[in-house]
Image: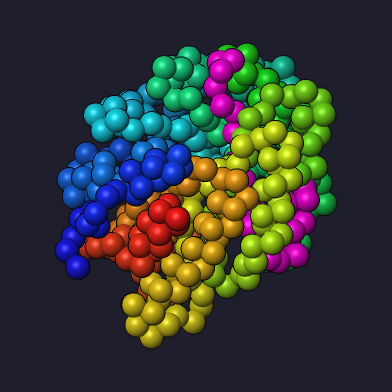
């Protein structure tokens, strides 16, 4: 199979024909340095999300000094290719610049000021170009089981934000965002809520409880993003997941898949073809259930195996040295079975 976009219509056009949106995470420096990748992204994606350019450590590397250069590079690429961009993430316990955690300990009033300055400044910058932001990312705590090193009983994970501002910080961030940009779509983004395991079920319950509490207090919130970092060693069953999405939609929220990629099981199938078929089957079941549950926007966390965080990030890379096959295109930018499955789901 040749390198580059699969023959026939791009995923963005297939999805649009069904009023769906397909997109991917991108890194600005790769778009600039890798013409084959940028051609692929231009053809396949309708929606882009910056993989790191919208995070705190990039946007505010020093207290009070904002750096929008890398984010603007993504926005320029999107504009040139008539793509939309979603933002990620206004509040997260990772990608915090070194100054931030100590500064948050200066007292609640200071912490509140820091949060507000960041959100207001960033949304002021992106008002014309980004209409959907992950306002809070990964705030739900990990229940016992699975990979979770430090399970807790509270619904919110322990974090510098929780320590500084107390459990009201989620609501506070959402309210600041709504006030700063009243028509922005406010998204609550979370991982680890898709599989048919007791801990994912518990996390779904925690998320529903937190979101219901926010809405009961008339806190602004428009959407829940399901990251979808899939793990094939976890069983998946459509029914509980569709039920979860349906419950969210019943609260008037949109649901979207924000970061799909696939981690394969410990024991791999003997050939690349068989591995790719298994990835496509597992992810396909997840995508179909997402569609059935009312998701209309689907993003992958990278189009190709070449630059994936599943290669470079020690926390998620395979320990046996095998490269990931968890994206729609391989490391030579050839389309795989997952790309075909996406096309099929968007065409049905
Ligand atoms: C990841 C990036 O892909 C990596 O390059 C970086 O080292 C760490 O962050 N959930 C999220 C994303 O919300 O921001 C993470 O992105 C992947 C998990």
209 relative to 220 in the view: left or right = right
Q: Nearer the viewer, residue 124 or 277?
A: 277
Residue 172 percent location from the top left of the image: 70, 23
Count of marks placed on residues: 0
Relative to 329, is 301 above or below?
above
User: Percent x, y for residue 250?
Assistant: 73, 39
Q: Residue at x 59, y 53 (%)?
A: 292
Question: Which quadrant holds residue 239?
Answer: bottom right
Above or below: residue 309 compared with residue 196: above
* On-image quarter of the N terminus: bottom left
Q: Which residue is drawn at the image coordinates 66% and 55% (left, top)?
A: 242
Instruction: Between residue 140 and residue 196, name the one nearer to us.
Output: 196
Q: Which residues are magenta?
A: 181-206
The image's colour scheme reads rainbow
* Residue 281 seen in the figure: yes
Q: Eyeballing the image, is 188 above or below 155?
A: above
**Residue 98 in view in this figure:** no
Which residue lies at the image location 26% right of the left edge and 44% below the top edge? Answer: 43
Image location of residue 158, percent across then percent down: 72, 44
């Amino acid at each position: 199979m040749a390198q580059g976009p699969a023959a026939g219509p791009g995923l963005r056009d297939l999805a649009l024909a069904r009023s769906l949106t397909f997109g991917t995470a991108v890194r600005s420096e790769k778009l600039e340095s890798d013409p084959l990748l940028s051609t692929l992204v231009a053809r396949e994606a309708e929606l882009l999300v910056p993989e790191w350019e919208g995070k705190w450590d990039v946007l505010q590397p020093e207290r009070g000094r904002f750096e929008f250069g890398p984010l603007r590079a993504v926005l320029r690429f999107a504009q040139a290719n008539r793509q939309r961009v979603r933002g990620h993430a206004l509040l997260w316990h990772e990608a915090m610049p070194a100054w931030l955690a100590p500064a948050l300990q200066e007292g609640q009033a200071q912490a509140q000021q820091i949060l507000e300055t960041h959100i207001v400044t960033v949304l002021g910058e992106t008002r014309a170009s980004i209409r959907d932001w992950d306002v809070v990312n990964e705030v739900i705590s990990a229940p016992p089981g699975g990979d979770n090193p430090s399970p807790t009983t509270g619904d919110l994970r322990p974090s510098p934000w929780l320590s500084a501002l107390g459990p009201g910080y989620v609501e506070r961030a959402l309210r600041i965002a709504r006030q700063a940009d009243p028509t922005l779509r406010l998204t609550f983004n979370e991982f680890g809520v898709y599989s048919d395991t007791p801990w994912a079920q518990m996390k779904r319950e925690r998320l529903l409880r937190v979101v219901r509490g926010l809405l009961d207090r008339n806190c602004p919130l428009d959407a829940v993003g399901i990251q979808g970092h899939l793990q094939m060693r976890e069983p998946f069953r459509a029914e509980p997941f569709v039920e979860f999405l349906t419950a969210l939609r019943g609260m008037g929220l949109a649901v979207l898949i924000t970061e799909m990629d696939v981690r394969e099981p410990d024991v791999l199938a003997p050939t690349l073809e068989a591995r790719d078929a298994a990835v496509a089957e597992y992810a396909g079941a997840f995508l179909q259930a997402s569609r059935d549950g009312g998701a209309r926007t689907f993003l992958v966390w990278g189009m190709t195996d070449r630059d994936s965080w599943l290669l470079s990030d020690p926390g998620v890379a395979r320990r046996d040295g095998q490269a990931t096959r968890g994206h729609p295109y391989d490391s030579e930018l050839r389309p795989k079975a997952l790309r075909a499955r996406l096309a099929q789901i968007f065409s049905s």
